[in-house]
Amino acid sequence: MTSKMQIKETVIEPNRPLGFSDIAEVFRYRGLLWSMTVRRFRDDLADLQLGVIWFVARPLLMLAVFTMWRNLSGANMGVDMSYPTYLYSGLILWFYFTEAVQNTAGAVQRDAGLIRKVYFPRLISPLTAVLAPLTALAVASIPLVVIMVFTATVPDWKILLLPVVLFQAALLAFGLGCLFAALSVNSNDWDRALGLALYIGLFISPVIFSPTLLAESRGYWVYHLNPMAGTLVALRSTLEADMAFPVQEFAYSAGFTVVSIFGGFFLFQRLERALLDRL
Amino acid sequence: MTKAETLLPGSAEPDAPGTAVAPPTEERFVISVENLGKRYMIGKSAGAPVQILPDIGWAFRRITPGGRRKVAAQNEADTLWALKDINFTIRPGERVGVIGRNGAGKSTLLKVLSRVTYPTDGRARVRGRLTALLEVGTGFSGVLTGRENIYLNANMHGLGRAEVDERVDEIIDFAEVRRFIDTPLRFYSSGMRSRLAFAVAAHLEPDALLLDEVLAVGDIAFQKKCLERMQDITQGSQALIFVSHSMDSIIRYCDRCLWIDAGRLRMDGPAAEVAEAYVGEVMGLKSQVRLPESVQPPPHL
């Protein structure tokens, strides 16, 4: 055995639970993760003459519409920072989240052709779904910088927490996406329900207004049961020096994310096995 | 799903005494298959919705005694063992053909060994990297360039970026597509596509290579080129498993052959002998095959 130290032995067995070795394997296949992410991104961009313009068109138009409504009506949004920065940053994160959850939910079905022909760590498929829309988010962040400059929004050290917030949003999208992938195998109702929830979520999450409107009422914590609420408020506090980081709210979001990741892993594994045998 | 585990309690301990008549010292092998079985659900159960989350009806049927009997009977009736009690060992440098009639379980065997699907029973051990070509050019994307597709396809078969970097020029030359390598794949002719796909496959350099008649595409010259290349790359210590219906190819390229019949290993021996026995039976020339090792497992197991 000593002479074969570097030869890896793979054991193929029934019902092997998903474990840390799978995470290690994903790392070994990181080249594939990159290639598949590029492929997915390029597939999405194929035949789009205007290309990346579409990544910024939606949030910018919605920014214009909502800002106009607010200015015409004089409505109180409870936002005590630059409203365009608040709104635009919320919109792009929410759209990223929407895209990532929906892509993840459809990832296994989408990659079924590959999964039936070649072995690779199956987690690559939903991970790709979460990573690919990050490009769109990055492109959509360029106008955000411009908006911040024009509205004189100055971040402080809290901006260092921005990657943490994004990471949490991506993991949450992954967990929820896997959950819905498992649920929607047998009925399309869940697909519709997910679409509706994400659409309504745009209006009830702290994207357009701030939960400080609810600060005095008991509804404040009920409102924060939405795991994206803490994430979105935390995002703004990383961009604006005067806004405190919502420690408790974000801790809840992070905890919810951990639970959803474990649930998602478990369901994803069952889904994969069930699908593989229906050939 | 845990049922499968309890069926073979010895599988958890590889070197448990008495599980197999294994040689005293760890034998050098690339693939070792032990009591491998794969069960599929057919008929009514197969059409049933995929059970991801248990529902109330599901729980009810399993808790009540009458329901349990029904479920068990239904499962029994709807079970198909695509593979059952398969045992063999493949050593470095061996070239092994797999033959059998349609539906005998050849493809299932390759799918289990390539980890595309899971076994229900038993286990298989693979030393080193195993590459299965159940299809050439898996994952090719029309929007990516030839070069990007090389990376994608090679990564998919387990090569890291650095490993692809080393081989990419060789692959491009082998495929004879250097002029078009940075053109999106959708502008390639089908010939260029399959040359590129094969070139990648030929440069994966695995420790064990599984082929499922992928070479049956293309013209004769192309097939010949592929097979010769396969022979070249398996000259060393690599092992080859080749599923084919062509006895000619089996005898020419393999030195050993497995005959799978109705999910069981019917015969394991020198390629010419097994192929002859198989042809003899299929042609109906011999109603009963009488060969020394036909039913017993080969001596080394």
Image (cartoon, helix red, strand yellow):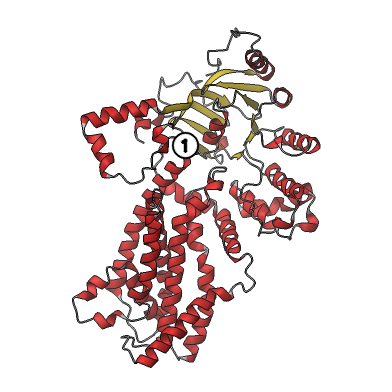
At numbered mark 1, what does the secondary structure look like: helix, strand or loop?
A: loop
Chain on which label 1 sits: B
Which residue is at the front of the view, B58 or B171? Answer: B58
Q: Position of residue A99 (x, y in %)?
A: 46, 65
Quarter holding the N terminus of chain B is top left
Residue, x 74% and y 24% (percent of image)?
Answer: B252
Residue B136: quadrant of the picture: top right
Picture quadrant where residue B14 is located: top left
Where B180 falls versus B62 (above or below)? Answer: below
Query: What residue occupies the far left of the structure in this picture?
Result: A218
**Above or below, A44 relative to B274:** below
- Residue at mark 1: B118
Can you see residue A124?
no
In the rendered view, would you say B100 is above or below A52? above
Instruction: Answer with left or right where residue B17 lies relative to residue B182.
Output: left
Image coordinates of residue B269 in percent, x first then y, are 62, 17
| Type of the residue with mark 1 | Tyr
- Residue at 60% x, 66% y: name it: A45
- Whether residue A158 is visible here, answered yes or no, is yes
Q: Residue at x 43, y 64 (%)?
A: A170
Mark 1, other Cα within 10 Å: few <14 / some 14–19 / many ≥20: many
Q: Nearer the viewer, residue B156 or B218?
A: B218
Percent coordinates x, y for residue B205 in the rendering: 67, 41
Counting from the top left corner in percent of width and height, residue A150 is at 49, 91
Q: Is residue B296 left or right of residue A264?
A: right
